[in-house]
Amino acid sequence: MGSSQYSVAIVEKELAKVGERVNRLISLSRARVWVTMLVLTLVGAFLRFYDLPVRSVWDGEIFTLLFAQYDWEIFLPSVAAFSAHPPLWFAFTKFFVAGGWNEFLLRIPAVMVGILAIPALYILGKRLFNARVGLLSAALLAFSPLAVLYAQNARNYTLFVLLIVLMLYSVARAMATSRAPNETLQKRFDLKRARWWLLFAFVGALGLYTHYLFLLPLAGIVLAVGLKVIYDAVRQNRRGWLGAALTRARPFLVALIVLGALYLPWTPAVGSAFLDRQLTREDANQDEEWDLSWQDVPRTLKDFSGDATWGLGLFAALAVIGVGWTARREKRAALFWLGVSLMLPIALMVILAPRRLPVKYLIFVLPAYLMFVAGGIVAVTDVLRQRVLHSAPRAAFAGFAVFALLLIATLPNMPYWNGTRTVFTGKGWKEMDVSRHWREAAQEVTTRAAPGDLILFPLAARALTSRSIVPYFDAAFLQKIYSAPPTGRAWWIGLQEDLEPTNAPRVRETREVDDIVIQELGNANAFAQIPLSNASFENGLSGWQRTGNEATWIQDSQQAVDGSASLRVTLQRAKNTAVRSAEFPVTQGKLFRVTAYVKNPTSGFYSITPQLSVNFYESNNASPKRTRLPIIVPTDKADWALMVVDGIVPAGVSIARIEFGIRDYAFQFEPTSWLDDVRVWMEK
């Protein structure tokens, strides 16, 4: 008996030693995994920081900059009034540009979120599949040109990806804790589960405050949870399945209530900011019209594959293998969560937007796609190890070779060295706006312009050109050039295709910054100030004509820049309205400048209200040729600000009128502004 006990003790001791060795190996394995993840995260950070501030801001980034620069007291009203996106991303960016902006500061939020998405995807992949799939998924995301591109643009799509990953992870954890063998354990697991459901509610609210389309994947996940709860209830209790399902769904329903409460303050803005404005604007973009077809599937997959033309087949094949491997390895939970929660929003988007579906609106599918590609690599490695190579190291080398092929296919397509200069929209690598050197062009003008010079933009594309370059004109420069009456020298800024032949007789010098043309125009005659009837509103609205009754126009003797009074305007209804001056004669081809002082101007989508413009009329046509230039002026300031319109009188016109337009987006501000001291200079 003693001998037997001694033998058992020896065995137990040896088993303890083996256990310690196994624990060391496991710990070492975990350490290696996290070291690998650290390396991948650092590599992904390098790829996202590389050449980050090199490109000038592009059209969509100006949209972010516009709202991020608002003062806090008007920030939420302005976003609610016009923005096509909720306020979270603009508020996040605002903290980085509060002390002044540059391209690096403007884009750093997207970079940070893009970097965080790499380890987050590893954690999700490990939870749904295993550590190998998690590592490979994170590696694919780190090297994804699409992910790098959006991480280097000051837009909210990288945060969209991170929040989708976190929401899927929280739901997977919450549902995994629901399998309790008895009631006592069920209560304990409910306590565990509560934190994951609260995380789900918090992340879901963040997603809805980030992008309105986040509602679609959120709805898909809600459907998936509902189906899973009903399935489990029916399987365990066919007769009383409804009551069992409601009991099981109680924490989930509480989480939905919390989510709804968190988002409730913003729901009034959804109708006006998104449904009314964004969808209406999409319908109006007939120049972008295109019909969905099966060709959009490979196009979208090509975008997800990093624009890898020959690598698309490899990526897609590995994804298909990964789906099959997931099913055979009994990872049906991963197929269920990724399939139901993501296929539903895709179907809804096809139904809701059959005309336009760029991949940026489908970017929430990217993590699932990369996880299935990673699963395909693991499946290929396992098959080679078991049936061909019969060696784990050789099979691992073969798997690494497959991953290397994917990198070879994608790395040349990184947005900063693939030679395209385009900003990604999702229709393949089709340009929305070429990344041009607006900063350098602005510096060229800033260093050479003198007080009294005019700044001109092409009539054909003045809105896009001006709003791309104006952010680089600081207040000191604007004050300098507009501090004196016009002298006759002008700076025309535009693209090669927008060159205007009428400039030719005036051109002194032409400089090119890539495809941006800067023409110094001279040879102007002296300027004369045109006497404008009641230009300082000393006689109320005498000499001015109102259009409609949507605003009240009242003389105000308490506010004035010139003389003893100004014109106070308050918009009362959400309509466009305007006030126009009397007519005055003009001569085609002549330079002009119009200035006015405005107090409390309000910015909307790339424009300002009151909007100062000049309407030119042909002798036989009552429709004006309007200058549609967004005004170069600091906005949303308490004091008086100078608004300026510089230009050349169009051909075929003989008369003009000054117009102040009030836009409907300002209605939600209940705005009151003041106008005073309107001046018109015209070349003789």
Image (tube, rainbow, N blue to C red):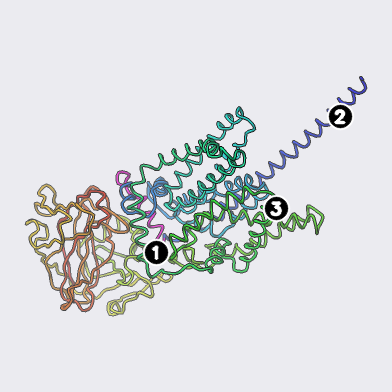
Which amino acid does the dot numbered 2 rest on? Val
| Magenta residues, dominant SS class | helix
Q: Is residue 658 above or below residue 655?
A: above
Secondary structure at numbered mark 2 = helix
- Image coordinates of residue 337 in percent, x first then y, are 58, 49
On screen, 661 above or below 100? below
Query: Few, some or many C-alpha atoms within 10 Å of disc 1 (few <14, some 14-19, many ≥20)?
Result: many
Mark 2 or mark 1: which is in front? 2
Segment tinted magenta in the rendering: 58-74
Badge number at residue 438? 1
Q: Which mark is residue 560?
A: none
Q: Return the disc, 2 or 3, that comes first in the chain's sequence.
A: 2
Badge 1 marks a residue whose secondary structure is helix
Q: Which label sits in the foreground, 3 or 1?
A: 3
* In the image: residue 5, left or right of residue 84: right
Q: Amino acid at mark 3?
A: Arg
Q: Which residue is mark 2?
A: 11
Q: Mark 3 touching mark 1, by CB under 8 A? A: no
Residue 139: where, in percent of width, then height? 62, 53
Alpha-carbon neighbours of circle 3 within 10 Å: few (<14), some, or many (≥20)?
Answer: few
Instruction: Kindly identify which residue carries mark 3.
Output: 328
